[in-house]
Image (spheres, helix red, strand yellow):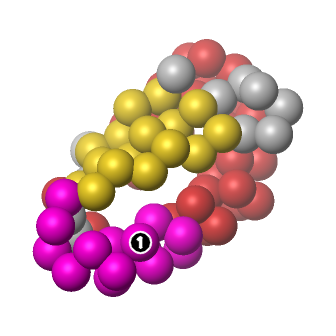
Amino acid sequence: MTWREELLAEIVNKLGKEAADHFDRVLLPNIVADFAKELGKAKGRRISETYHVDDGSLTLILTGSSFDDIKVAVH
């Protein structure tokens, strides 16, 4: 399972399928774009970025040094 699939499965467990679908369509593309920008700035160094969903329902921590190595934690 990819990090994205694991993330969505965890959101389904916490908030339900509808919330996970919304997150996947609306929020995740922006988070991925921002993390990609930060990875580019890091030039191969391992980074960690925290993202908070506006309604307070989730906090995501993405860590990695490339797209092949992303790990995500949901709080």
Q: Which residues are magenta?
A: 33-46
Q: Secondary structure at mark 1?
A: helix
Q: Quadrant of residue 34?
A: bottom right
Question: Which residue is located at x 66 percent, y 39 percent?
Answer: 52
**Quick check: 25 above or below 14?**
below
At a point 73% along the width and 24% down the height, the residue shown is 57
Above or below 8: residue 58: above
Query: How many numbered badges does the structure rendering display?
Result: 1
- Identify the residue at image location x=72%, y=39%: 53
Secondary structure predominantly adopted by residues drawn in magenta:
helix
Q: Quadrant of the N terminus?
A: top left
| Residue closest to the eye, 4 or 44 | 44
Point out residue 37 in the picture as x, y percentages from the top left corner: 45, 78
Residue 19 shows in this picture: yes
Residue 2 rendering spot, x and y as whole percentages: 29, 50
Q: Residues within 10 Å of mark 1 (few under 14, many from 20)?
A: some
Name, please, the residue furthest toward the right.
55
52 left or right of 56 in image: left
State left or right for residue 22 relative to residue 35.
right
Q: Magenta stretch: residue 31 in it?
A: no
Q: Which residue is mark 1?
A: 38
Residue 25 spot, x, y in % from top left: 71, 60
